[in-house]
Amino acid sequence: MKRILFLLVFLLVFQSIAWGAEDTKHFKYQGSVPVQGLHDDFFILELSPNVLEVADPSFKDFRIYSADHELSYQVLREVERHNTLTEKMEVFNKGLIDNKYSFFVVPPGKLDDEELKYTVKLNSAEYLVKADIYGSNDRYNWQFLKKQTLYGVNNSFNSFSLDNVAYNFIKIEYQLPNEGLLEVKTVEYSRVREVVKEREPKFTAYNVTNEGKKTQITIDNQYAYFRSKRVDIETPDENFYRQVTLEGRNDGEWQHISMDIIFKDSTGEKLDVQYSPGNYHYLRLTIKDEDNNPLSIEGIKVQPVPTYLLVNATGEPEEFISEVYWGDQMLEAPNYDINNLKLSRTPGDYQQFYLANAEENPNFSEIDNRMPLTERMPWLMPLSLLVLALGTGVFLYRTVKQVG
């Protein structure tokens, strides 16, 4: 009797194992990444756009292997290129002198591996002014540093840096516009340190149409759900100021993304439109020309937003081949320890590798609804019932015999 019960338990356990086992032939896509010179327990794996195009957005079916065992990973959703710490600055002596508004601030100390960026916010929902920036060590003798355009539109403000400038005080002065008094609201500085290598913006296909008093640029990012955050415009034109609107879509209707401005004059230029990271196959940029001639467009670049996986390679050799599989929609998301670990280092401190291509798995075996073991082996259930019936019969026979 014990042997029969053991056999039944074995069959049930075997069925459960066979049902939960992962077979690489059920993954539609695969890729490999040579990991070389590994000197840490973790590394960063960046996924290329053509990998993302055929991947489930949740990454629930991604599996990474080294030799015959699985490597755990954590999806890093939004890893910015920079680690930024922003602080407000105290503003001194703000006021109006000879129809010019001016104020000064005390710049903070700067570390060698960081860049300081300043953001001036004025008390208007939308503005653009030309400012002169001065430096001083005593607040009496001011040295002209540069001209700088300050603008704000749609709750977005430009920032600027003062490279290789070492003064105790920084003064900002600008001519008031005709609309009235435009005062400083806040001044902020940000300590910017690069933590993750960012890929350069890529030239992309586009089409330009001029209609009435506007120019429309339709951009094709090549991949469905291409993740991006900035559009750069290349034009030889000088001395212009334009309002722009950006929209995006995949297969459906156009969706509004942002409003911004672009300009180029003697104080500088702004030829990019930045927005919150989003997934768009197509982008459409509308430039309001008003009564001006349309801009000459020589090129369009789109800044991609990388998607990273933080991979746990504890115990792995310095060099190995990391095999990546995905495209098995029957799999549930894995529950790894790495998702609950608190790492003391930023992602940029780890080595970075790149999964460039998505290849179709030559051994792929498509199963619409993965069958449990009993359906793949139809003889298994009748055999189990037969064994169970025999066991029950033997048990009853012995019981009756003992009573008799």
Image (spheres, grey):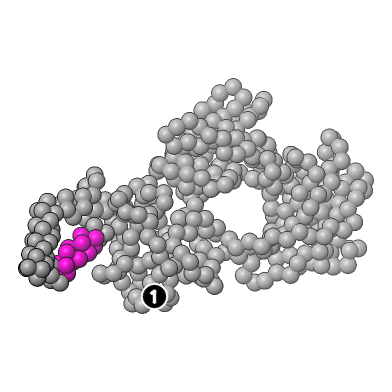
Label 1 belongs to which residue? 314
Q: Quadrant of the N terminus?
A: bottom left
Q: Is residue 107 left or right of residue 300?
A: right
Q: Is residue 194 left or right of residue 17?
A: right
In this view of the protein, can residue 35 be seen by the observer?
Answer: yes
Range of the magenta residues?
5-17
Is 141 in front, or is 67? 67
Relative height, residue 288 to residue 339 (above, below): above
In reply to whether residue 12 is colored magenta, the answer given is yes
Give the residue displayed 21% in from the left and 55% down from the top. Answer: 25
Q: Mark 1: which secondary structure? A: loop
Relative height, residue 298 to residue 356 (above, below): above
Relative height, residue 357 to residue 107 (above, below): above
Outermost residue, top direction?
A: 212
Give x and y (percent) for residue 108: 75, 67
Classify residue 48 by image quadrant: bottom left
Q: Give the amino acid type for the residue marked by disc 1 in the picture.
A: Thr
Give the residue displayed 32% in from the left and 54% down from the top. Answer: 331
Give x and y (percent) for residue 253: 48, 30
Is 79 in front, or is 205? 79
Give x and y (percent) for residue 303: 51, 49
In reply to whether residue 207 is colored magenta, the answer given is no
Give x and y (percent) for residue 304: 48, 50
